[in-house]
Image (cartoon, coloured by chain):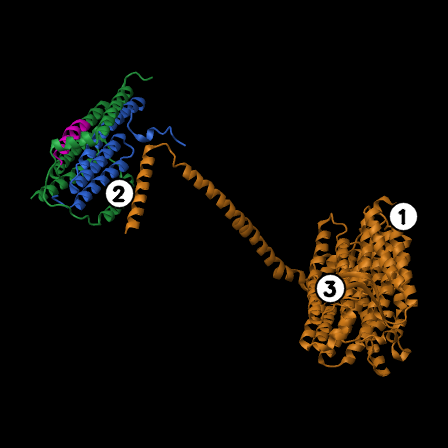
Chain colours: A orange, B blue, C green
Amino acid sequence: MKLYLSLILLLPLMGGIINALVGRFLPRKGSELLACGVIWGAFAASLLASLEYQGAARIDLMGWLSAFDFQAPVSLYIDPLSLVMIVMITFVCALIHTYSVAYMAHEEDYVRYFALLNLFVFAMLALVLAENLPLLYLGWEGVGFCSYGLIGFWYSDEANATAGRKAFIVTRIGDTAFGIAIVWMFMLMGTVSITELNGMGSTLPMATVTGIGLLLLIGAMGKSAQMPLMVWLPDAMAGPTPVSALIHAATMVTAGVYLLARMFPLISPSTTAMAAIAVTGGVTAFYAATCAMAQRDLKRALAYSTISQIGYMMLGVGAGAITAATFHLLVHAFFKALLFLGAGCVIAAMHHEQDIFKMGGLRKRLPLTFWPFLAGGACLAGLPLTGGFFSKDSILAAVWLKGGALYGGLYLLGLVTALLTSIYTFRMIYMVFGGDDSAGKHSDSAHACKVPGLMEGALIPLALLGLFGGVLNLPSYLGGGWLGGFFSALPGGKEAEASHSLELSLQAIAGVLALAGLAIAHMRYGNARRQERIAAAEGDAPGFVTFFQKGWRFDDLYRFLFIRPFETLSGFLWRQVDEGLIDGSLDRLASFLGRSGEGLGAWTSGKVSVYIISFAAGAALVMAYTAWFLL
Amino acid sequence: MIVPLTHVLILAGIIFVMGLACAIAWRSNLIMILIGIEIMLNAAMLAFVGGGAHWRLVDGQVFSLVIMALTSSEVSLALSMVVYLHRRKKTVSADEFSDMKG
Amino acid sequence: MEQIFFYILAAVVLVATLLAITEGHAVHAIVYLATSFFALAGIFYLLGAPLIAVFEVIIYAGAIMVLFLFVIMMLDMGQPEKARGPSLKQWWPALLLGAIILGAMFTLFATTIPETLAGWSYTDAREFSRVLFRRYGVAVEVISLQLLFALVGALYLGRRKLP
């Protein structure tokens, strides 16, 4: 076990370092082979580790931070949660690395790309396997940095660099809260080891637990792009599509959910914190679904869809259902990566055109992309019997079973969001793949590009996993869930018991809504009406559509609330204080000294009159002094 | 003595200050500066004589004679310099001769 | 009665000096100054120094003032009628510094000096010369040398042909 876990961490790290240092000197094929090979190796190691798994264990690798009573060695913790995570992460990352080889075939700077990608995988695995919070924070920051580097990969275009900066800065806000929480926990309990912290939660007063829970929630908000820190994810689509698939769909953005699931025993006693998590998740899910309905850019629509689905996961955590949330996390990773990779195929075929209103008829030209994409879309929408259906419904069931007015309201919100999810998913599919071949009218060349077989090939395993992923955790009336059983040892892993009929009825409601969404999308975007929609989209959009398209104008709000005062303040401090006050006072002091020197120098004017007055003044001074002292 | 020494000294002081005022106010005219100096020296002589009279010593009068002698030599030299300077620049304004600047 | 003389002569000295220093015309200033010297000589006599009074008139008012007049008239300094006195801007440092010094002096003079002997006596020529040539004999020689230096210097500076 120790060997396998070390390999899991070391292989991507070595790949990244070797690529970064000597990648330029290797042949192209060699560098790419190294990058992909280490991830497939890590996947193999994680499979072997899961075969050998016997129960939760803590494995110490080496010492790291140690000062007085602050101990943070490099120690890993393997338990059901981290085990499923590393298997999923290594598998999806390996597929995406292979896909990237074809996607980035025309890219000159591939060494930087693959090095950053490998380092990202290392950081993510460190995050997931960490046993103490500083190591988790190391992974946390590492994924943030690699995300920044990869979003701004084509940094010569300033918009991309700005998007990378925006992502980094917004997640930083969350990271600060998380850091404060780590220090606070150390101050309270004298340890930063996760297992020990989770055990000591009962000794703390409720207000403290709520405070820690809220700080961790803010940290998760930043990393997982929940409200109000979600503004960075749509702009992060400026990076290459495999990056979007990997980081911003499957792995990094789930880190926030993972953190909350990890610290669940510590923060679950606080109903306020749990409610806050659930509300954040529910509101974000609804918000993102409404925004996705109005997007024209294919990748942005998928980004909002990611925000919405992670909102569902947070809702699950907030309702205390770790199993349901993790189930949805796994299935979502598969189908969201699939959707993004499919979008990459589409975009590559359309000469990097990303507006869905300019695409069409691709189901005939790209059949190998169409069917997996359709499968992924079905999972996303939650059509009955797909993997997405079971996972989303298990979250909704958990929320319903929690009871109470708040969770009831969130359940209804979740249902509405499911309907919207279905609508926007099929809207995307109809616009991109439906209709006849209109690409010839819009693109420059006579026909679209050929999509490399490697890219389309990577879609197939993901599609299968998405469709049949439901078997991971079947509801109890179908034989009980494997994942639920596997997680039962975890705190919060125990699923809420519900009667079969209640489960069936809840699932029926969800299924009906998904099919209703499909019907609505067909009515609006189906065959004949599709052309009307394209024509209608030619002109300017009406006001409320722009509102949704711009993400409820949160960017403008933040610019107004934070950025403009900050810029005003910094401009003031720059011009008035730094240049005016500090530089100016020094300049004025220097010129004053110069002028006073010149003034004193003018005393020796060579004129008798000046000297006479000087004599008289000196005499007056001496006489006055004498008289003063004789008084 | 016919008047207290204090009165004599006060008179000498006022005369001295008047001479100083003359020298300062006319500081651009060489001749008037010299006249101011003369007044100041006179005041000094008065102070000496008064002091000698108060303490019944002759030395006060002797020194006022010494002042007178020195003043005359000083004035002659000064006036010859004024003549010289006037020949150079045709003016007795003291501000014209500022070659010692700096 | 001599006190009244003293104060009258003192008034004359002050007024004449004041007029001398505020007069723009140089010759007028000299003449006023001669007047003040005459009055000062009278004061010297009242203070028991008749020899000094005589020397004041002969040397000061007689030789030095006349020397001034010679030089002023020799220099021919343009139109004396249009001579401008110094403006108020020129006068205020003089007034200020003068006032300070005057104030300091009065403060110093305020201490009373004890009277020694009453009565008025004067020093005649015999006694004066006795002290001068006996006790201050060396000083007399030095002064005479100094007058020589002044003579030579004045001759050199005043010659026509410049070097």
User: Which amino acid is tagged 3?
Assistant: Ala
Give yes or no for residue C53 being in the magenta stretch: yes
Q: Which residues are magenta?
A: C49-65
Q: In the rendered image, is residue A472 in sight?
A: yes
Disc 3: CA contacts within 10 A as few (<14), some (14-19) or many (>=20): many
Residue designated by label 2 = C98
Instruction: Please state the horizontal and vertical placement of residue C53, each as a whole percent of the image.
Output: 13, 33
Report in which chain the residue with disc 3 lies: A
Under tag 2, what secondary structure?
helix
In this picture, is A338 found above or below C85? below
Give yes or no for residue B70 being in the magenta stretch: no
Taking depth in this image into account, of A177 and C2 the one nearest to the observer is: C2
Question: Are labels 1 and 3 on one chain?
Answer: yes
What secondary structure predominates along the stretch shown in magenta?
helix
Residue at far front of view: C134
In this picture, is A229 found above or below A490? above
Report in which chain the residue with disc 1 lies: A
User: Which amino acid is tagged 1?
Assistant: Lys
Instruction: Please state the horizontal and vertical placement of residue B64, each as a whole percent of the image.
Output: 20, 34
Under tag 1, what secondary structure?
helix
Residue designated by label 1 = A29
Residue designated by label 3 = A225
